[in-house]
Amino acid sequence: MINKHLTRLRQGDNFALTDIYNLTKNAVFSICYSYMRNYQTAQDLMQDTYVNIIKHILKFKDGYNGRAWIHTIAKNLCLNELKKRKRETCVDFSLREDLAGGYEQALPDESGIIGLACKVLSDNELKIVMMHTIGGIKLKEIAQILQSPQGTVRWQYNNALNKLRKNLASIGELK
Amino acid sequence: MKKKDIEKMLINSADNFVPECLDKILEKTKFITPEKPTTQPRQSFACFRRFATAFSAVLIFFSLGVVSFFGYMNSDYMTVYLDINPSIAITVNRFEKVKSIEFINQDAKVLFENYRAKGKPLEQVINEFLEKYLQKTERLEEDAVLYLSAYCKNNSKSEEILKRLKTKASQVLKDKNADIPIEELKITKQERNQAKDKQISPVKLKLIEQILKVSDEHTEEQLQNMSIGELKKLLNDLIPDNNRTKGNN
């Protein structure tokens, strides 16, 4: 399905981008968010992903897995951004009044299950849970994105769900 | 709460969680044109590099194997002695190609001064040796005997070679109308080393030892100066039914 739309886009049909966006937005955003852990940055990188798809569409070949190609673009953008941030000097925004506030956008689901997942889960667990549940990416593909064995990914996913279940149960008890 | 319920909760929250930014994307991509690919895809180069590495590793292993095989096959394998006065020792490799010739006595040195045998097949060298000997010897000794002897770690191999060489040599002698009896002998490592120390052929050493066993009249030095034919004759005189050197091993 995706390959068909990507081929259309390569042939110059710009309306194909809307179809590609509708089919992949969840997966792309989940990848960006799970890597960056910042809603606004993830949103920017999501946009950049689609810009890059248009830029490099001529490199897309018929035999490729279109979905995996898009996921790789999103992942590489995130990794580049993280690398760039490592090189930059850290500034404490709270100490600079001119810069503080107005940038950080809160999660739409801050008090919901996603907010809980962000608090409770480790980096890798959050990536797997986000990509699988929000993005709808198969665990096999997640294993390829994270370059880990499929068994490890499956195990970490179950572990993460157990963690969430325990935390939800303890919250329920408190209430 | 079950795991499935948590999964469902997460999936249901996806719609609220994922932002809608199609308009922004369309705005951004309005003036963007696709870039033409300029470089070769990296994957094919990586594939070629992997193939080249594997191929060179196989090539290195193969060449090492070939080199060690030929090194092994070309090492000294057997020494064949021809005693008829002149006496020579021929060292061959596993391909039965001559590696070197040692002239055991002065006659051999004179007769084969400019002879090049390196790399030639053993049988050819023996043929040439006999032909040259018959050409240069005007009159054959009355008691001339051709002794073919060999030393090899593999006993069965030396037996087989001696048998083959005997057939070849008798053929050559027959063609040249030379009536010379041929006897074959296997040599042990100890005998070979002893003969080397005394600078005589192992066959001569064996004959001398046999003569000294039955006679006190001769000294070892005297016997060393005699030819193989003379020694054989002397031994026959001392032990009329002498047949000991023949097929001794």
Image (cartoon, coloured by chain):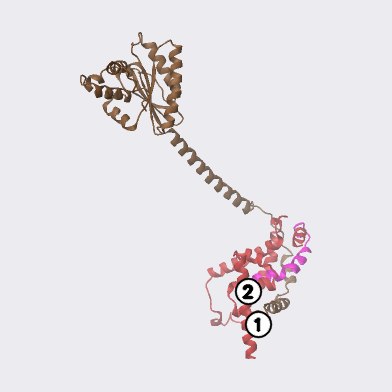
- Comparing B225 with B205, the one in front is B205
Q: Is residue A43 left or right of residue B183?
A: right
Chain part drawn in magenta: A9-33
Residue A110, which numbered label? 1
Q: Which chain: brown? A: B
* Chain to which the residue tagged by mark 1 belongs: A
What colour has chain A? red
Residue A94 is situated, as x and y percent measured from the top left of the image, at 55, 82
- Identified by mark 2, the residue type is Asn
Q: Which residue is mark 2?
A: A158
- Identified by mark 1, the residue type is Glu
**Label 1 to label 2: alpha-carbon separation:** 23 Å
Q: Main secondary structure of the magenta part?
A: helix
The correct choice, above or below, for A104 with respect to A70 in the image is: below
Residue closest to the far top:
B138
> Which of the two discs, 1 and 2, labels the residue nearer the N terminus?
1
Indicate the quadrant where residue B185 lies: top left
What residue is rendered at 52% in x and 72% in y? Answer: A89
The verdict on a common chain for dots 1 and 2 is: yes
Q: Mark 1 falls on what kind of element?
A: loop
Indicate the quadrant where residue B9 lies: bottom right
